[in-house]
């Protein structure tokens, strides 16, 4: 994320889900509200699609849901990466210099679910699938969607659907393993945090994130463990891996017969905070507990350098005096203490940073506020490991 010091944040997130799980609706509902004046005013963020054609398509999907209760059609074998430039409305300083430079960039990789569910048609499609998967290896966080509608269809025997879902993803990754590892061996850069997300969560209004987690553990814990083992076989330092330890509820809107209420969205404003904050907290925690080798940690934390610098700025504001020396080292213990900072402290940091046009620090403080609030509300559950 760019600010007056020139710091810039670019985060990637990989989204996996079977066909019909709601990936197209999710990305359209993430993008669409930020094209409306009221949402920009309320959140203080403007989200722009770097590719205007993609932006128009997503906006059209959103308007179709908002104005005509029309749900966009599911895409088949359509592998798309969306690049969103994020601008903070609170900063009016140096507007000419910042005109063509975003404060942050989010790259959203949408991986076709069909490649986990069906047999490939030939060598050309196999090569396309491998190349598509390589494009998302820069992501630190992956979202694995559990389709709320399918879960409802299998109510009373949810294990049948869940075992099939996790089994398909596991088998799909196994087919990619040899070509991914043939040149360099275990991968350093790979999504290490796999958040299991309940999509279409509006269909399960009484299922908070804790109950969702409990259902998964009760019905499909063996399959999640198998998936973790397969992913562990792809990465260097496989102990530094979180699969099925973080959970989130996602809903693009409230869908009723003949109407779609897009104001009733859940969890979509956590996409950027999850992509930005979770990797920094987790990577440093793993390094401190010696789950990450020094070489792998350095490569991962170098990527997080801009966030770490902002986290240091927050730490200097919210920590007691005796801990300020830690801020100069910015180690895992410090990260955990920043994560525990109170609401008033973080809001104070955000206000001061905004006044100074230190947008990265302001935004990181807001992301932490968003995650903390969502955890209290039963929308997200973060691993403590």
Image (tube, rainbow, N blue to C red):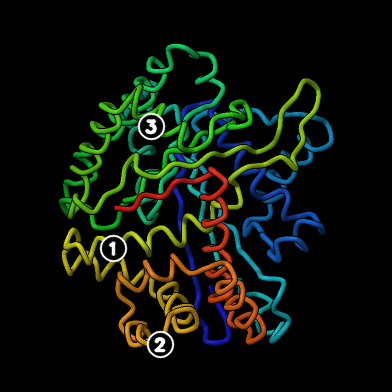
- Asked if residue 254 is positioned above or below residue 319 in the image, the reply reads above
- Tell us which disc is closer to us: 1 or 3: 1
Q: What residue does disc 3 label?
A: 125
Contact, CB < 8 Å: mark 1 with mark 3? no
- Asked if residue 63 is positioned above or below residue 214 in the image, the reply reads below
Contact, CB < 8 Å: mark 1 with mark 2? no
Q: What residue does disc 2 label?
A: 321
**Earlier residue among tags 2 and 3:** 3
Task: Identify the image quadrant of residue 351.
Answer: bottom right
Please name the residue shown 54% across and 43% down the image.
Answer: 379
Q: Secondary structure at mark 3?
A: helix
| Residue 87 as seen in the image, left or right of residue 114 | right
Q: What residue does disc 1 label?
A: 285
| Residue 23 as seen in the image, left or right of residue 167 | right
Q: CA distance from mark 2 to mark 3?
A: 58 Å
- Tell us which disc is closer to us: 1 or 2: 2
Q: Nearer the viewer, residue 98 or 256?
A: 256
- Asked if residue 229 is positioned above or below residue 299 in the image, the reply reads above
x then y, percent, for residue 298: 25, 71
């Amino acid at each position: 994320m760019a600010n007056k010091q020139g710091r810039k944040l670019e985060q990637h997130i990989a989204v996996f889900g079977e066909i019909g799980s709601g990936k197209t609706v999710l990305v359209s509902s993430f993008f669409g509200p930020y094209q409306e004046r009221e949402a920009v005013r309320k959140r203080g963020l403007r989200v722009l699609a770097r590719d205007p054609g993609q932006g128009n398509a997503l906006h059209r999907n959103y308007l179709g849901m908002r104005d005509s209760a029309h749900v966009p059609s599911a895409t088949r074998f359509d592998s798309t990466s969306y690049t969103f430039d994020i601008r903070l409305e609170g900063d009016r300083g140096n507007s000419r210099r910042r005109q063509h430079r975003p404060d942050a960039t989010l790259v959203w990789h949408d991986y076709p679910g069909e490649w986990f569910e069906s047999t490939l048609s030939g060598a050309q499609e196999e090569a396309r699938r491998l190349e598509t998967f390589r494009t998302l290896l820069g992501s630190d966080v992956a979202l694995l969607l559990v389709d709320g509608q399918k879960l409802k269809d299998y109510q009373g025997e949810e294990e049948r659907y869940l075992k099939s879902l996790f089994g398909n993803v596991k088998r799909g990754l196994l087919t990619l393993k040899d070509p991914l590892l043939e040149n360099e061996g275990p991968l350093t850069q790979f999504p290490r945090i796999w958040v299991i997300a309940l999509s279409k969560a509006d269909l399960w209004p009484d299922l908070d994130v804790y109950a969702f987690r409990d259902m998964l553990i009760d019905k499909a814990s063996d399959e999640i463990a198998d998936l973790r083992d397969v992913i562990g076989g792809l990465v260097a330092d496989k102990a530094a891996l979180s699969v099925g330890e973080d959970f989130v509820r996602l809903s693009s809107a409230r869908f009723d017969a003949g109407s779609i209420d897009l104001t009733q969205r859940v969890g979509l404003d956590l996409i950027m905070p999850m992509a930005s904050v979770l990797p920094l907290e987790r990577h440093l925690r793993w390094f401190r507990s010696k789950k990450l080798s020094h070489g792998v940690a350095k490569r991962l934390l170098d990527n997080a350098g801009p966030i770490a610098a902002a986290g240091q700025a927050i730490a200097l504001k919210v920590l007691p005096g005796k801990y300020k020396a830690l801020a100069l080292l910015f180690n895992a213990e410090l990260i955990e203490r920043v994560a525990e900072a109170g609401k008033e402290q973080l809001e104070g940091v955000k206000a001061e940073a905004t006044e100074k046009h230190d947008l990265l620090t302001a935004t990181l403080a807001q992301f932490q506020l968003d995650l903390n609030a969502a955890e209290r509300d039963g929308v997200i559950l973060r691993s403590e490991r």
